[in-house]
């Protein structure tokens, strides 16, 4: 049994970028800024999910075309939390 | 706003949030590992692979944290990084902070005085339209031109004035008019000032209550007073019922009729009046007591609307010219002096002089010091200019230090920029470092300034501007000046190095710390250093001039034995107000008791001689000494500056005068009336009147006939800066020397003169009882008082000179260190090709010394030119003795060489091998 956070979408989509916040970008991305947050919100439309499930969902729905690295995923998720577009909750899942 | 709240909440829970994120990442990895194991990987491989696939989780955590931190967080990180960098580079931080502390602190100290003098106008309506009528001649003394009521009336009739009021003069000879009032509810005497009716209306000061009226100023009027807001608050708790009530006070109860506006304590700078009383009350509350109700007044006038100070001044001049043309009568209303001042005191208002209108914001005065018009001489301007020069010198030094530090960290910058750090970000980080240095430096500078202000009383000038009487409390202007100074320093010292050091880097910068220096910037830095050194040399030479002048003042110049003489002045009663009969009666009474005092003083152990006669130096003596006198000799009549000094026969011995020819005076030489007086003259006077050298036995007339019986070496008269040494000494009897008002004594003692003050005062008290004024000064104190301005100059320029010297040495150190850093590769190659470390060090050192040498030469030339100007404005300053003055530039050169040598020592750290590898 693993413990993890589940994120639920709460508000409509909006454009944002997390990669401008640092002088150094963590990983060069081919995506346009803000695309990742958009994809994450789309993934959360299905219901509360934790980080690993979101990554897997994105990989599967893109037919293995989109591999979101964890180092990009979690800052983007924090960005959603900061903007109030998603809410965190702790829960257990078998 | 909402995002700020979210940030704050996150900051509050940051540890919990960080733990949660770390846990989630670990869970993520765990799931990935489980997936890999499900695909058939063994547990160890799956764990390893899952970690690799997760990438840099620390970076992910940092990024996630930055989302919440925002720009504020980034700035905080910059601050932390900057502080870390400073800790790693401690030497740079300490030297920079010291540089800033010195130059900013010195500036703050000067500004504190400038602020108190010029930037805090009294709280009166339209200060620009309020003037004091002062006497511009006579060493800035207005008290020579005190006004009688009749004079004020004439002034009031002038159309240029909208109103005229007066305040009672209480300094110098007028000390006996000083009111002495003690309220039962306040501890000790309060500073009180007697003024004419309408004083507050003319000054334009708001009052709660009413101003003094003509009725209040009648001799039989009920005693009334106006309180200051401060006294009302501290002494009476702002009790409104006090206004109109009669308050118990010594010597008379006073009915309070008003309270002045807050912060008003008198129109002159330096006044701290808490109680104002009508002029007529002076006779009942003055320390010395008076017989008449008409004390001398200082006149203050409100200009009529549309009249400028310059316009009013012209009108005044026109009036005085008419007055002079019609005869030798004094200006209207001036209290006229007796034609022959009695022994021990002098009047200065014998001749009509054009009076000056001084804007009230420029007038300084206190109950015991004469009125001075500040800002007429350029002393403060020179002080400010020097302070600014030192600030600029500090900026230059700091700039070089920052440049050197940046050059040394070039490799670090290159790495950071190569990793993607933007130029703005790098500059921000450097700016944070500089700001930290600046903050520490500015705070330390303020501390230094506060300490300096506390030390100021030691530099206070008796008889001059009493700095301690000024309001030196820090205010917003001071803080603003400090912040502004710091910002200017930052802008001047930091901008260039920041722009330069964060230029896009080349690959070579990454390979080896081999800073590049463009020829133009290097040249600019050398020119800057040369200019800084030139300014330092000027300040140092000025310091040298003042120090030499002060030293000479104590040894060679005075002409009397400063270490063994004591001067005593006692004032029995006010001289102005007595009727002739009363005056004569008092004169007789003092004359009667004076021999007893002289005997009592002679019995004090250690006292060798006691004579009646005044100190050769002093403000009033100086005014007398500058007055041209007609001297009639056998060869004709000449007008020269000549001091006529009277004293009992022992006076010259008491002064320690050096007899050159003939004899000194004896009791047999005492004459009265118009009989020919045997006299002793100074060598200067003998030379001036009888250049052939046969002065003994010669006769001359100076009002009275004199016969020369002896010549003594020169004794300075009035003031050392006057260089007036022509004097004639004649013998007086004790009766002649005693005056009803002031008696001056000269004592010759063995041992420490300062130890005699107590016994002398005791002897005076036992003879005369309590007197309004008794002053005992040692010869050294008299000279120190006379040389007050020069001593202040010596302190000021020496202090600033040392600061400038330290900054100059710092600048040289910086330049040479920078040179070594910038030409590291070249020096390495030279070493590889066989040059010795010493020769390379010499190369670096000479590059640092060259601009210093240029600066020294330019500075000495400029100082030689300026010395003439300084001497013209500050008479008495020694001429510039070039060989002696060269010591200071040589000290500067030596300091520069030392600092350069320390910096050049870094050459030894250059490795030839490393340099060749980089090539």
Image: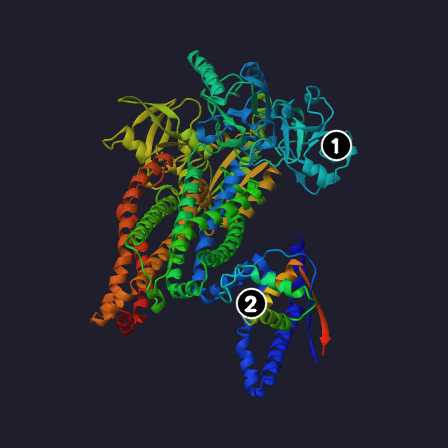
Can residue B176 be seen here? The reply is yes
Coloring applied to the structure: rainbow
Q: Which residue is drawn at 57% across and 60% down?
A: B73
The numbered mark at residue B564 is none
Distance of label 1 from label 2 (alpha carbons): 87 Å
Q: Name the residue under label 2.
A: A72
Residue B737 in percent (x, y) is at 49, 31
Is label 1 in a helix, a strand or a loop?
loop
Compared with residue B110, is residue B872 higher up or lower down, i.e. above or below?
above
Q: Residues within 10 Å of mark 1 (few under 14, many from 20)?
A: some
The foreground one among B904 and B891 is: B904
Is label 2 in a helix, a strand or a loop?
helix
Question: Taking B133 as reference, is A44 left or right?
Answer: right
Residue A63 in percent (x, y) is at 57, 71
Can residue B787 be seen here? The reply is no
Q: How crowded is mark 2: few (under 14 residues within 10 Å), some or many (20 or more)?
A: many
Compared with residue B651, is residue B22 higher up or lower down, i.e. above or below?
below
Query: Residue A66, located in which quarter of the rendered image?
Result: bottom right
The foreground one among B855 and B835 is: B835
Q: Do pointers 1 and 2 mark residues of a single chain? A: no
Q: Name the residue under label 1.
A: B253
Residue A55 in percent (x, y) is at 60, 71
Q: Which residue is drawn at 47% across and 63% down?
A: B86
């Amino acid at each position: 049994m693993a413990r993890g956070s589940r994120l639920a979408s709460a508000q409509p989509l909006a454009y944002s970028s997390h990669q401008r916040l640092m002088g150094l970008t963590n990983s060069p991305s081919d995506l346009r800024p803000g695309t990742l947050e958009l994809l994450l919100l789309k993934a959360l439309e299905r219901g509360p999910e934790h980080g690993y499930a979101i990554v897997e969902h994105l990989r599967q729905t893109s037919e293995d075309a989109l591999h979101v690295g964890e180092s990009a995923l979690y800052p983007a998720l924090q960005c959603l939390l900061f903007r109030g577009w998603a809410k965190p909750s702790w829960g257990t899942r078998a | 706003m909402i995002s700020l709240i979210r940030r704050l909440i996150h900051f509050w829970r940051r540890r919990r949030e960080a733990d949660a994120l770390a846990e989630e990442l670990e869970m993520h990895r765990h799931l990935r590992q489980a997936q890999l194991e499900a695909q058939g990987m063994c547990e160890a491989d799956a764990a390893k692979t899952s970690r690799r696939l997760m990438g840099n989780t620390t970076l992910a955590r940092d990024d996630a944290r930055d989302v919440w931190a925002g720009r504020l967080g980034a700035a905080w990180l910059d601050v932390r990084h900057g502080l870390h960098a400073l800790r790693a580079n401690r030497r740079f931080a300490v030297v920079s902070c010291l540089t800033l502390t010195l130059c900013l602190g010195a500036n703050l100290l000067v500004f504190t005085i400038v602020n108190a003098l010029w930037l805090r106008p009294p709280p009166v309506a339209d200060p620009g339209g309020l003037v004091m009528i002062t006497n511009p001649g006579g060493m800035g003394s207005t008290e020579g031109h005190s006004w009688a009521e009749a004079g004020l009336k004439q002034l009031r009739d002038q159309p240029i004035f909208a109103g005229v009021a007066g305040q009672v003069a209480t300094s110098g000879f007028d000390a006996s008019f000083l009111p002495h009032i003690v309220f039962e509810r306040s501890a000790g005497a309060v500073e009180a000032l007697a003024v004419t009716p309408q004083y507050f209306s003319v000054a334009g000061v708001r009052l709660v209550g009413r101003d003094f009226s003509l009725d209040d100023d009648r001799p039989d009027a009920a005693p009334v007073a106006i309180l200051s807001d401060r006294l009302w608050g501290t002494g009476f708790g702002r009790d409104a019922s006090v206004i109109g009530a009669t308050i118990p006070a010594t010597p008379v109860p006073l009915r309070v009729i008003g309270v002045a506006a807050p912060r008003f304590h008198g129109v002159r700078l330096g006044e701290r009046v808490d109680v104002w009383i009508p002029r007529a009350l002076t006779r009942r509350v003055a320390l010395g007591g008076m017989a008449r109700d008409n004390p001398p007044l200082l006149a203050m006038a409100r200009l009529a609307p549309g009249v400028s100070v310059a316009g009013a001044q012209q009108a005044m001049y026109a009036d005085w010219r008419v007055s002079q043309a019609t005869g030798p009568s004094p200006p209207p209303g001036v209290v006229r002096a007796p034609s022959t001042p009695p022994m021990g005191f002098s009047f200065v208002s014998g001749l009509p002089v054009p009076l000056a209108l001084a804007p009230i914001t420029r007038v300084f005065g206190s109950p015991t010091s004469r009125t001075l018009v500040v800002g007429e001489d350029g002393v403060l301007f020179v002080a400010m200019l020097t302070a600014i020069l030192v600030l600029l010198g500090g900026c230059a030094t700091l700039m070089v230090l920052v440049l050197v530090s940046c050059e040394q960290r070039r490799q670090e910058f290159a790495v950071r920029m190569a990793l993607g750090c933007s130029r703005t970000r790098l500059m921000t980080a450097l700016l944070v470092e500089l700001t930290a240095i600046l903050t520490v430096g500015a705070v330390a500078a303020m501390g230094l300034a506060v300490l300096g202000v506390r030390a100021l009383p030691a530099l206070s000038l008796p008889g001059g501007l009493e700095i301690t009487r000024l309001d030196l409390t820090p205010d917003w202007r001071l803080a603003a000046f400090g912040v502004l100074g710091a910002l200017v320093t930052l802008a001047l010292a930091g901008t260039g190095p920041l722009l330069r050091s964060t230029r896009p880097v080349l690959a070579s910068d990454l390979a080896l710390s081999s800073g590049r220096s463009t020829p133009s910037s290097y040249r600019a830095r050398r020119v800057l250093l040369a200019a800084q050194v030139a300014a330092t040399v000027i300040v140092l030479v000025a310091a040298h001039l003042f120090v030499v002048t002060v030293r000479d003042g104590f040894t060679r110049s005075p002409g009397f034995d400063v270490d063994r003489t004591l001067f005593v002045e006692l004032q029995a009663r006010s001289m102005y107000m007595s009727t002739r009969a009363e005056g004569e009666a008092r004169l007789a009474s003092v004359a009667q008791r004076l021999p007893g005092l002289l005997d009592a003083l002679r019995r004090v152990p250690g006292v060798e001689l006691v004579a009646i006669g005044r100190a050769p130096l002093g403000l009033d003596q100086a005014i007398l000494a500058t007055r041209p006198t007609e001297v009639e000799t056998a060869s004709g009549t000449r007008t020269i500056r000549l001091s006529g000094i009277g004293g009992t026969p022992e006076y010259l011995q008491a002064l320690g005068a050096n007899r050159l020819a003939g004899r000194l005076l004896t009791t047999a030489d005492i004459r009265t009336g118009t009989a020919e007086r045997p006299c002793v003259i100074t060598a200067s006077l003998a030379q001036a009147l009888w250049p052939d050298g046969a002065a003994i036995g010669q006769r001359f007339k100076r009002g009275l006939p004199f016969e020369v019986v002896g010549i003594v070496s020169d004794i300075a008269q009035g003031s050392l800066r006057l260089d007036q040494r022509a004097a004639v000494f004649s013998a007086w009897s004790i009766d002649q020397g005693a005056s009803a008002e002031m008696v001056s004594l000269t004592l010759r003692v063995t041992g420490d003169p300062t130890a005699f003050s107590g016994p002398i005062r005791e002897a005076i008290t036992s003879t005369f009882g309590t007197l309004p004024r008794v002053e005992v000064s040692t010869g050294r104190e008299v000279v120190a008082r006379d040389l007050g301005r020069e001593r202040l100059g010596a302190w000021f320029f020496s202090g600033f000179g040392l600061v400038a010297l330290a900054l100059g040495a710092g600048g040289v150190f910086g330049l040479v260190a920078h040179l070594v850093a910038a030409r590291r590769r070249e020096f390495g190659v030279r070493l590889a090709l066989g040059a010795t470390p010493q020769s390379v060090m010499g190369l670096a050192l000479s590059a640092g010394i060259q601009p210093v040498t240029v600066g020294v030469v330019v500075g000495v030339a400029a100082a030689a030119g300026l010395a003439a100007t300084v001497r013209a404005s500050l008479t008495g300053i020694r001429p510039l003795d070039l060989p002696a003055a060269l010591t200071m530039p040589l000290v500067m050169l030596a300091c520069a060489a030392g600092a350069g040598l320390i910096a050049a020592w870094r050459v030894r750290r250059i490795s030839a091998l490393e340099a060749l590898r980089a090539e």
